[in-house]
Amino acid sequence: MTAILQIIFDALSLGSLYAIGALGIALIFGVMRLVNFAHGDYISFCVFAMLWPSIDAAAVVFAGNLPTFILIPLILAIGAGLSVLSEILVFRRFRNANPATMMIASFALGFVLKHFLLMLFSSRPKSIDLWSNLSLPVEVAGARIPLLQVITIVITILILLGLTAFLKRTRFGLEMRAAAENFTMARMLGVKANRVIMLAFAISGMLAAAIGLILATQSGTADIQMGVSVMLVAFIATVIGGLGSLPGAVIAGFLIGGVSVLMQVILPLDARPFRDAFVYGAVIACLIWRPQGLFAPKSAKQRV
Amino acid sequence: MTILSVDGITVRYGRLTALRQASLKVDEGETLFITGPNGAGKSTLLKAIAGVVPVAEGAITLDGKVISGGSPEDTARLGFSMVPEGRHVFGSLTIEENLMLGAGMRKDRARAGDDLAAVYEVFPMLKERRDKPAGVLSGGQQQMLVIGRALMTGPRLIAIDEPSLGLAPKVIDQVYETLLELRDKRGLTLVIVEQSSTRAMMTGGRMLLLRSGEIVLEGDARSLARGDTLKKAYFGYGEH
Ligand SMILES: Nc1ncnc2c1ncn2[C@@H]1O[C@H](COP(=O)(O)OP(=O)(O)OP(=O)(O)O)[C@@H](O)[C@H]1O
Ligand SMILES: [Mg+2]
């Protein structure tokens, strides 16, 4: 029983990261039809923003030493700022370009960010100590669960509730949902394109920052590659969820997290090193079964 | 008084010229029908005014302000409300959300509430279903919704692209009745793209015929539709 509980918490906390990542990608795709491959590098950037540039193995913590109630908003703001800046400087010029061109621009931006970090910090992962007492276990119904897992899940639930309230209850949220369904029509009704897009980028950047904070706390390291691996799975989750569908992205994120953890448990020992092959096999099967994704939005096809 | 003036605009899609040196003026409070065969450039003309497609040459002014080169949202904010071909309701938004979206740019939120009540009065069917997703509406109901939504922006001019497309004759009658009532009550200016000249004849107003991207005929809707000048111009007899 406690083992099962442990598996459930593992699955939920891993799924949380994928879900938040997928949400960040789906939000941008919704309003701009852009798959932003730089999203993973936003995650790494936010983690490294807590450090002072150096190529030593031990991180020189800088902003990371700030008290929590300042550090968290600061990192979220850095994520939002970086994301909005990339919209203004890069993606705005490609707004009417075809999706492939935009995607390549996002790859290029990702490379620029990655190499910028490489230049300042070198490629060696650094150890970083954020809220390390969170890795202590707590007792949940007899099972010993790391506190950080519980917090990750709670934060994710709060993010999902907050975002839902924002989208459903506010004027900006209404405009964003309309823009995601049919941008041109929304503009013809006076919805300001720049405002909606910048808002989507800001939220997406904050989600990336949240992942960065959780990952850095979890792993105790700052690694330039750390965002990219989450981003890859998150991207797959947005496709499985049906590109542009926000609930789809979230559910698919949790689904992949769940399948990964489950495979880790049920696969025979010899096969475990190839777990990811099985996970991606399941992904392929899922896409063959439903190529449009699990929850394809009706709108994705047509615009005025 | 002229509210909208289009001066020699040319619109190209790649190498195809969809609109060539088109000029027209619309007076405040009038009804202008734009007709012409498929592919003539009627929708393109409205889209160019709305700022959805860029103009290669010429200028468009609304109320004395140049709007060509601007964005759709700016044009909408100046009082031009467009109901595009194919209606484009936001199917995942509720009916009321569809309507309220139009009211976003209004500074006077209180007026928007009054307008919502007014739209519901004109279309009681929308009020009954206000919390339903707009995607469930029938074609005719969707047409009502997009007209209502266009009204919510507090426009001075409404342009509608083929309002009768795919609707039963009875429903078309209803749509036109509403439009004309709104025109008379609110002093709205109407620009209507319509393939059939019979509607223009029944309604009256001015009519303009587009063919192959050029405005080839212009005049009073009733007198044009009565004679066979229109038919000739429509199909391009006796020219080549
Ligand atoms: N987005 C586009 N890209 C390329 N060509 C286009 C585009 N939109 C329209 N066209 C072309 O421009 C010309 C004019 O099209 P438009 O839609 O304005 O005609 P229309 O008069 O509205 O026709 P219909 O009565 O069928 O609605 C047509 O030849 C059409 O094929
Ligand atoms: Mg048309």
Image: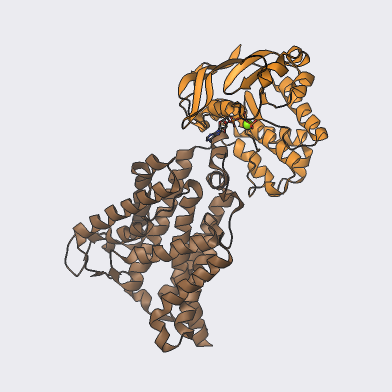
Image quarter hosting the N terminus of chain A? bottom right
- Residues A31 and A45: in front is A31
Where residue A122 appears, x then y in whole percent?
Answer: 19, 63
Where residue B149 appears, x then y in whole percent?
Answer: 66, 36
Where residue B110 appears, x then y in whole percent?
Answer: 63, 33
Image quarter hosting the C terminus of chain A? top right
Q: Is residue A113 above or below residue A96?
A: below
Q: Is residue B201 left or right of residue B11?
A: right
- Residues B221 and A19: in front is B221
Q: Determine the colour of chain A.
A: brown
Please report the residue visible at 77 percent of the width from the left and 19 percent of the height from the top: B201
Res B188 seen here:
no
Residue B194's quadrant in the figure?
top right
Query: Coloring scheme of the render?
Result: by chain
Q: Is residue A117 above or below residue B149?
A: below
Chain that appears orange: B
Please report the residue visible at 24 percent of the width from the left and 56 percent of the height from the top: A115
Picture quarter with ligand 1: top right
Question: Outermost residue, right direction?
Answer: B170
Where residue A188 appears, x then y in whole percent?
Answer: 56, 34
Res A273 seen here:
yes
Please report the residue visible at 39 percent of the width from the left and 66 percent of the height from the top: A230
Q: Is residue B74 above or below residue B88?
A: above
Question: Outermost residue, front direction?
Answer: B240
Q: How many marks?
A: 0
- Residues A50 and B26: in front is B26
Please report the residue visible at 23 percent of the width from the left and 69 percent of the height from the top: A126
